[in-house]
Amino acid sequence: MHANPFTLPFDRLPVSLPIFPLPGTIVMPGAPLPLNIFEPRYLNMIVDALAEDRMIGMVQPDPAAKDPRGEAIYRTGTAGRITAFNETRDGRFLIRLTGICRFDIQEEVPTVRGYRRVVADWSRFAVDYETGGRVPERRDLLDRLKAYAAAHRLQIEWDALRPLDDLALVNVLTTMLPLDVEDKQAIVESVTLEDRARLLGALLEIAQSPFEAGPGRPH
């Protein structure tokens, strides 16, 4: 997955990196994520990231945390590298992140440019630099995806999914599908491919009805 010569080796991943907290938005290793950047603090973040190693950590706000300032975030996210960049005439950046590796947040560090920055612990996710991997339930996962897409009237590019190996398939689906914040986070925190595939399949089956929600989800 990380044959790209511009991707940093695992042992050279940065000690700290900026984070972009967005609910329902994650990026998994190897998957692309388009972003439209317009807030001044995040415009600063992109400029600074481009001047360094082009790495940004995608994290989700924690809706269950009791934080009067509304700044609580989950402690696990995924770092992506800016692999495409474009300016717009109205002062926005259109970028594409490609997921590299998940991380745990050790602590936040002070910044002066408005955005947040954290010290990252990569050690739990060295597996993200491994290639390949098999999912025994691939056909079952795709069947559940078809039922989920039909229930939610989602357009799926099936021709783009067919050539993906199992690892890429699970990571791309996790990144792109409109799953709940808690569901996406549960998959992000599942270390092995087998665990992520099993959880994703279970969530797709539960969510086949667009009206099903609430307690009882597998976490």
Image (spheres, rainbow, N blue to C red):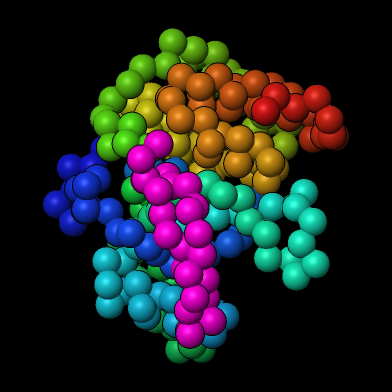
Q: Position of residue 158 (x, y in %)?
A: 47, 32
> Who's the residue at 39% across and 64% down the image?
17
Considering every residue shown, the one lying at the far top of the view is 136
Q: Could you tell me which quadrant the N terminus lies in?
A: top left
Region rendered in magenta: 101-124
Q: Relative to residue 33, is residue 108 depicted above or below?
A: below
- Residue 117 sits above or below residue 4 on the image: below
When the figure is inspected, residue 167 is found, relative to residue 83, above or below; the finding is: above
Q: Of 46 and 146, which appears nearest the observer?
A: 46
Most distant residue in the left direction: 5
- Residue in the image at 51% along x and 65% along y: 108
The relative height of residue 85 versus residue 28 in the rendered view (above or below) is below
Instruction: Decide if residue 13 is on the left or right side of residue 209.
Output: left
Point out the image quarter for the C terminus: top right
The answer to whether residue 60 is visible is: yes
Asked if residue 5 lies left or right of residue 120, the reply is left
How far across and down, in percent of the image, does residue 188 sit? 52, 39
Asked if residue 108 lies in the magenta stretch, the reply is: yes
- Residue at x 37%, y 62% (from the top left corner): 16
57 and 172: which is toward the camera: 57
Residue 162: say if magenta. Answer: no
Is residue 128 shown to the viewer in this render?
no
- The residue closer to the viewer here, 26 or 119, is 119
Q: Main secondary structure of the magenta part?
A: strand
